[in-house]
Amino acid sequence: MELLKLEIITPNGVIYDDDVRQVTLPGSEGEFGVLPRHAALVSLLEAGVITLIDKSGKEESVAINSGYVKVDEEKTTCIVDGAVALTGTGSELAEAISEAKELLKKAEASNTAIAAAVSKVEQIGKTR
Amino acid sequence: MANLKEIKRKIGSVKNTAKTTNAMKLVSSAKLKRTEELAKRSRVYAGKLTELLNEIAHKLQKAGKESLDNVYFKEVSRPNVVDIVFITADKGLCGGFNAQTIKRVSQLIESYKADGTKIRLRAIGRKGIDYFKFNNVELNDEIVGLSSAPDYAKAAEFINEVAQSYVNGDTDKVILVHNGYVNMISQEIREDQVLPVDPSKLELSAVSTSELEVEPDDDDTLLEALVKRYIEYTMYYSLIDSLAAEHSARMQAMDAATKNAKEMVKTLTVAYNKARQEAITTELIEIISGMESMK
């Protein structure tokens, strides 16, 4: 299976750097998905959730407040202000979710975007 | 034997000083480690951000916009007003760390004044503020507390104000001066032109040539957002860099001070022993001469 390299970078360091099958990003003009060999693209990112499917087929989510993404044929680089990975189970996940909600509420974005992102985060909490 | 007592007291006091400076050195080295880690992590982010800005600028240049006619890129050959933002520490006892920055700033002021350019100073850090205030140099901004505890939000707020006055046309150029971290034992003065963003610094040849799509469509929104983030980050990174340099400079200064104090204790101990021996000898002579006279 073809993979693309994904990097998520915050001012506090690199939080994700691995090959993934696909990634869905909250662009300022709407959500979009990226598969390997996507055409080169630069976009602003809004408050929302990055959803990725890693090389083993597992789904992962990362809540972000704002940033940029640069996509080219082999590599996708997300440069974001703040990010919280929604991983783990039980109390760990619950903690990550409340942290993510906090981050999203503080983000400078339209209320609808924030509300949509928060509900998405909550959804993740319920399904896992 | 007042001399003996005095020397003993001096030895005690110097020993105490050595203890203090040694403690300060240890504190600084611990803090340096933390700041260094912070700098390392944010360096990745800074690098990627610059790369992205490069690529956008490159794309715009290729798209036919001869020079980037965005206000953030407008290079003025003869600036009328120049803003100098400089970072010093809030505390002293770090060798020539603050003095070096102040010296460079003074040099810059001189050279711009010779060209008839108006200078506006924006100071971050108490030491720099104190110096220029003492010399009756006007400061436009005085910010204390930011250089000892860099905070992204505060740094962004400050530099955005500066950027706003640049966009309004109040200033033609913004320069950032700080003493940066090289390694444990050396620092160097770094001078960055924050605004206008210097396109010659962007490595335009190094980027891929493939067609680049941009969202949102009008280039300016993205470019502006990027430039803003770029200068915010330059500011923040300089603060961290300066803090790391401050700690390394203090570590060095305190290390030297501890060494000097120990050296001094040695010299004083020799003097003390000499004085004691002298006293004993004098006493002996007194006793012997006393006995001689009784014969």
Image: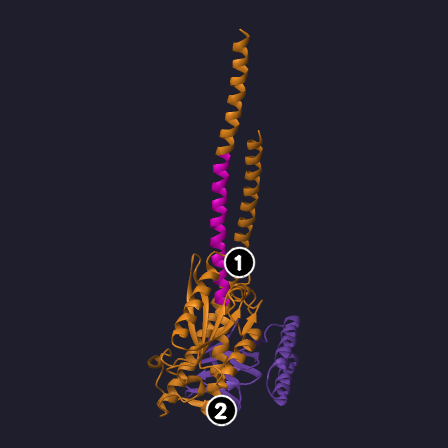
Chain colours: A purple, B orange
Identity of the amino acid at label 1?
A: Gly
Does residue B229 lie above or below B260 as drawn?
below
**Residue visible at 55% across and 39% down in the picture:** B10
**Residue visible at 48% across and 38% down in the picture:** B266
Which numbered disc flags the more N-terminal residue, 2 or 1?
Answer: 1
Q: Is residue A14 visible?
A: no
Give residue B216's mark: 2
Spatial separation of the CA atoms under disc 2 and disc 1 = 48 Å
Quarter where residue B211 is shown: bottom left
Identity of the amino acid at label 2?
A: Pro
**Quadrant that contains the N terminus of chain B:** top right
Instruction: Please state the chain letter of the residue tagged with numbered disc 1 in the rendered image.
Output: B
Instruction: Please state the chain letter of the residue tagged with numbered disc 2 in the rendered image.
Output: B
Identify the secondary structure beneath mark 1.
loop
- Image spot of residue B75 (x, y percent): 39, 83
- Image spot of residue B25 (x, y percent): 52, 52
Q: Which residues are magenta?
A: B240-269
**Residue visible at 58% across and 33% down in the picture:** B5
Give residue B92's mark: 1
